[in-house]
Amino acid sequence: MHQLALPLLVGLILVALAFDFLNGLHDAANSIATVVGTRLLSPMGAVGLAAFFNFAAYFLALQWPALHKVADTIGKGLIDKDLVTPSVVFGALVGAMFWNVVTWVKGIPSSSSHALVGGIIGAGLAHAGTGAIQWNGLNKTLLAIVLSPLLGLILTMAIMLLTSWLGARASATGAEKTFRGLHLVSAGAYSLGHGLNDAQKTMGVITVLLYSTGYLHGGFHVPHWVALSCYVAIGLGTLTGGWRIIETMGTRITKLSQHQGFSASAGGSVMLFAASYFGIPVSTTHTITGCVIGAGAARRAAAVRWGVARNVALAWVITIPASATVAALFYWLISGYYVPVLIAVGLISFVIYSAGAWKIQS
């Protein structure tokens, strides 16, 4: 158990809630990209819809507590909970928030979830080495990086084909009207799944912080006040929107019809609810991107802007190592290890400078 003064504990909890807020802002595009891209709702209306259902996930979890397994995975399934310290939590949060801000400014739909996973792993490794890693939880999360967009793509294409077959005899006007209504429902369901899965990641961080400092009594569990505050924070973050990323997700990867928007949201919502049930901290960004690509590819492969999709995929690959590196640096910094920080910053600066020079020459 690690001693931590109450004011510092409150400060760390506020930092965690700030990450949750930033998660909502950064991932708002995941929930509403299809309804904005198809002009089903105005941007403000879509943001309001997403924020409402992000928060409504709290009541869903109250009814079915089994859906809160993701918080356990984050809190004790990646790093041994008995080795977590306040410094590890701070480093993990800063690493994740740094990467979220960078990708938000650049309009890149990277994963807030995997930025947090990278932050936890990086700070945990810096503190206790590889012995701190819970390999079962980490392997499950890494596997989801590959499977979630792939399964989302396949499921969305299947929904597209099935609904096309069922509506083969419908008129164009009737089909459009039907899919507008279905799209609105599926977008709400996706926002519900998004809030359910993503808010739990911050719950896990706050819970393991309380556990490691002796403020949590009665075993490892998520207190109700922690759950409620996390759902409020992510809902408020979503309410502020993420306009740069919305453009990428809703229009730049592929143009969507109401039929495609419904299929992408429906496929994504199924994936998120399944992930929450099995306790997998899946990336909502990866999931909906795979679904959007599947919706476009079901029409024709040329409808997808594969160059944009490739750039998005590149951001996925570097998210965990980038956020892990920043988290480790901040852990060393607040722990007084200034020399490793200076060496690491120097090496990173050299690599970035060399890459830029090589690009100019080529």
Image: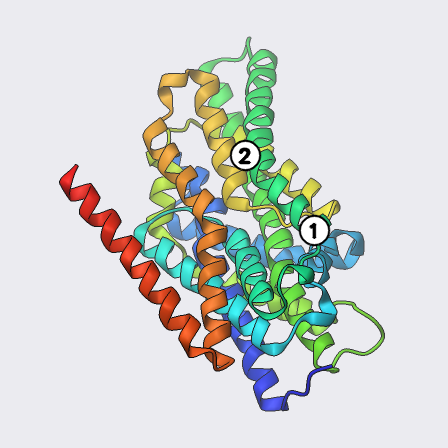
Which x, y percent locates residue 334?
48, 80
Secondary structure, mark 1, is: helix
User: In the picture, residue 248 is in which quadrant?
Assistant: top left
Above or below 146: residue 69: below
The 10 Å Cα crowd at callout 2, few under 14, some 14 to 19, many 20 or more, is: many
- Give the residue displayed 52% in from the left and 27% down from the top: 179
Which x, y percent locates residue 331?
51, 73
From the viewer's perspective, is 28 left or right of 210?
A: left
- Residue 136 visible to the viewer: yes
- The answer for how far apart the CA atoms under marks 2 and 1 are is 22 Å
The residue wearing badge 2 is 149
Q: Residue furthest left?
A: 361
- Give the residue displayed 57% in from the left and 41% down from the top: 145
The 10 Å Cα crowd at callout 1, few under 14, some 14 to 19, many 20 or more, is: some
Residue 321 vs residue 16, the one in the foreground: 321
Above or below 313: residue 31: below
The residue wearing badge 1 is 135
From the viewer's perspective, is 304 left or right of 15?
A: left
Q: Earlier in the sequence, mark 2 or mark 1?
A: 1
Above or below 282: residue 328: below
Residue 345 vs residue 218, the one in the foreground: 345
Q: Which mark is residue 291?
A: none
The mark closer to the camera, 2 or 1, is 1
Which x, y percent locates residue 314?
40, 40
Residue 318 vs residue 5, the one in the foreground: 318
- Give the residue displayed 47% in from the left and 58% down from the top: 323
- Residue 22 visible to the viewer: no
Q: Residue furthest top?
A: 169
Amino acid type of the residue that numbered disc 2 sits on in the rendered structure: Pro
